[in-house]
Image (cartoon, rainbow, N blue to C red):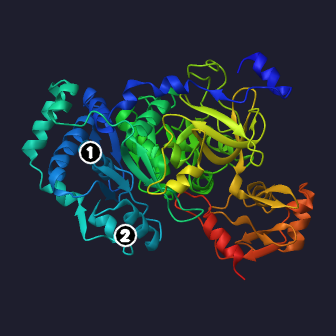
């Protein structure tokens, strides 16, 4: 925004859209390409660089050339032997998941990284929706998932690798080193055109219902990798600690495709819950960046020594709103920057990100401060955004609070086999995020809450998340390793809805009211019903399981 536009916004007549070159970005030739071809050329360009260090058991590292050679050999084996278009994958972040995903993409298959933390019924639903006949995993993984509904055709990656000819892999590796990458990719019959065709399938967390299949195209994945690259957040000189699951959109992009396409090295640990192990790995590998959520970061205060995280330049948080004061506490304790970003599975996922130091992104904010506490940063290049009134449907000035709509090459085209639901999330070509948001005069995006996390009581919109944050502060729950409280609404014939507090600690209505009144909350915002539970339902990402929360609140 220009100075004139900012002034107009303050007077209520400002711009109704922010556009960071969406149309121009959409026209990039590379976005018409194939994910496999883009990865092939990037890996072959610097075959000696280390792409991944796997710390699952011991320490194993693979260079770009070896990843490509092994994946090519696997793809040859699987091209004729694996039926169907989509193939299930069950792996934590690491070498196994990386070469499996790449090998399938190289032969035009669609990898489906299955969320093994779902219940059995939800996993079966995912496999049925995706028409999966074959799942690729490993015996060690299968032993840890005894209740997973494995299909008849399960391929063990280690067994598959053991059948490959060493001479073939060495020959492919030599070819990668000495042959022009474009020529070799065509020689190996790697598809070159992908564009809007499906390249990967993820299933949303199901926090508000049955898992939804989110089909991401070649354009979506390549586009978001280039958007992340354009932020200069992860140059090749950085070392990323990858612990988010690859069935989650942030893990899928940052632990798989960004390292192969952009060039940043990733060090993988199987689970974001293994705090002590992650801290030790950061110290030993000199990792400089980590992605996670506030829920996953909270245990570090008790389980990690600040000296172990000395190599980190910054941490990035997403998936859930960071509680007030948490970022400052992190920075004071560990001595590195705490940055928030924002995205959704449907957006591949990154929409906006705070940047350390000054912004190096081409556009109106080049050279300006790249971060603002409380915001989720500025939108990335190639995105256009607007704010729409939740009830009026009117397009609002961008500094007013309303539902965030976005456009960009990273926006998916619809849910798998669900045209009715797909139609609901698009409006005039814009994707409706479902999040209430606003921009400030400097272009920073602030997420005020998810529209589904509000109750309408007596005509007023009451935010569940804000109330939870006040309760966390009032009862000194900031350092809890898991969510201890959750607020939701249930139907009330008189007022529309009544607020319910689920609590894993003992709280009386009288004490709750006293402390929240002292904090300045209106009586309308104070839950009238408190239900004590053993634990608050959570998803593998650390976010609240909203469906589970609502179910517990509704129980009599």
Which percent across, then down, holds residue 125? Answer: 43, 67
Query: Which is more toward the observer, 66 or 544?
Result: 544
CB contact under 8 Å: marks 1 and 2? no
* Residue at the spot of label 2: 144
Q: Name the image quarter holding residue 384.
A: top right
Q: How far separated are the C-alphas under marks 1 and 2?
A: 30 Å
Tell me the SS state at disc 1.
Answer: loop
In which quadrant will I find the C terminus? bottom right
* Residue at the spot of label 1: 108
**What is the crowding at mark 1: few (fewer than 14 residues within 10 Å), some, or many (at least 20)?**
many
Tell me the SS state at disc 2.
Answer: helix
Q: Residue drawn at (79%, 61%), measured in percent from left and top?
A: 471
Does residue 299 appear left or right of residue 417 in this picture? right
Q: Name the image quarter holding residue 313.
A: top right
In which quadrant will I find the N terminus? top right
Query: Which is more toward the observer, 238 or 432?
Result: 432
**What is the crowding at mark 2: few (fewer than 14 residues within 10 Å), some, or many (at least 20)?**
few
Q: Is residue 263 visible?
A: no
| In the rendered image, the vertical position of residue 6 relative to residue 201, given as above or below | above
Which percent across, then down, holds residue 500? Answer: 77, 70
Does residue 296 appear left or right of residue 516 in this picture? left
Q: Nearer the viewer, mark 1 or mark 2?
A: 1
| In the rendered image, the vertical position of residue 284 relative to residue 178, given as above or below | below
Tag count: 2
| In the rendered image, the vertical position of residue 27 relative to residue 481, given as above or below | above
Q: Is residue 276 visible?
A: yes
Q: Residue drawn at (90%, 72%), measured in percent from left and top?
A: 510
Which percent across, then down, holds residue 236? Answer: 41, 29
Q: Earlier in the sequence, mark 1 or mark 2?
A: 1
Which percent across, then down, holds residue 304? Answer: 56, 52
């Amino acid at each position: 925004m220009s100075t004139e536009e900012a002034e107009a916004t303050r007077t209520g007549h400002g711009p109704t859209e922010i556009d960071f070159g969406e149309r121009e970005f959409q026209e990039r030739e590379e976005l018409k390409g194939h994910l496999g071809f883009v990865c092939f050329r990037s890996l072959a360009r610097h075959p000696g660089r280390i792409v991944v260090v796997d710390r699952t058991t011991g320490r194993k590292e693979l260079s770009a050339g070896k990843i490509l050679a092994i994946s090519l050999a696997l793809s040859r084996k699987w091209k004729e032997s694996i039926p169907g278009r989509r193939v299930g994958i069950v792996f934590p972040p690491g070498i196994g998941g990386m070469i499996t995903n790449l090998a399938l993409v190289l032969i035009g298959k669609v990898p489906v990284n299955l969320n093994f933390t779902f219940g059995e019924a939800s996993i079966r639903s995912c496999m049925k929706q995706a028409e999966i006949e074959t799942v690729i995993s490993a015996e060690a993984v299968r032993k840890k998932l005894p209740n997973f509904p494995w299909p008849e055709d399960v391929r063990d990656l280690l067994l598959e690798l053991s059948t490959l000819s060493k001479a073939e892999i060495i020959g492919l590796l030599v070819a990668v080193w000495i042959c022009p990458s474009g020529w070799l990719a065509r020689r190996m019959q790697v598809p070159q055109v992908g564009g809007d065709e499906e390249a990967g399938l993820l299933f949303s967390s199901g926090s508000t219902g049955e898992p939804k299949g989110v089909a991401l195209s070649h354009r979506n994945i390549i586009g978001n990798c280039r958007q992340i690259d354009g932020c200069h957040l992860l140059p090749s000189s950085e070392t990323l600690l990858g612990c988010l699951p690859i069935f989650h959109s942030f893990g899928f992009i940052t632990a798989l495709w960004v390292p192969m396409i952009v060039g940043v090295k990733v060090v993988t640990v199987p689970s974001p819950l293994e705090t002590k192990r992650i801290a030790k790995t950061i110290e030993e590998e000199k990792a400089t960046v980590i992605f996670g959520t506030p829920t996953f970061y909270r245990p570090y205060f008790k389980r990690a020594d600040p000296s172990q995280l000395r190599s980190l330049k910054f941490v990035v948080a997403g998936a859930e709103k960071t509680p007030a004061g948490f970022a400052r506490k992190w920075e004071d304790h560990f001595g590195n920057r705490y940055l928030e970003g924002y995205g959704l599975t449907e957006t591949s996922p990154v929409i906006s990100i705070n940047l350390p130091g000054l912004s190096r992104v081409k556009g109106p904010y080049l050279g300006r401060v790249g971060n603002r506490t409380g915001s989720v940063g500025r939108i990335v290049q190639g995105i256009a955004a607007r704010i729409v009134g939740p009830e009026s449907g009117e397009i609002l000035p961008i500094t007013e609070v309303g539902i965030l709509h976005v456009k960009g090459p990273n926006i998916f085209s619809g849910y798998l086999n669900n045209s009715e639901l797909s139609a609901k999330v698009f409006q005039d070509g814009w994707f409706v995020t479902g999040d209430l948001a606003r921009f400030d005069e400097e272009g920073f995006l602030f997420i005020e809450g998810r529209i589904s996390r509000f109750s309408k009581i007596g005509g007023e919109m009451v935010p569940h998340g804000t109330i939870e944050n006040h309760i966390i502060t009032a009862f000194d729950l900031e350092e809890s390793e898991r969510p201890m409280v959750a607020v939701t609404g249930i139907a009330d014939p008189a007022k529309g809805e009544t607020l319910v507090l689920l609590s894993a600690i003992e709280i009386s209505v009288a004490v709750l009211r006293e402390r929240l009144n002292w904090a300045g909350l209106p009586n309308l915002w104070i839950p009238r019903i408190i239900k004590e539970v053993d634990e608050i339902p959570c998803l593998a990402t650390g976010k609240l399981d909203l469906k589970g929360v609502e179910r517990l609140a509704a129980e009599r």
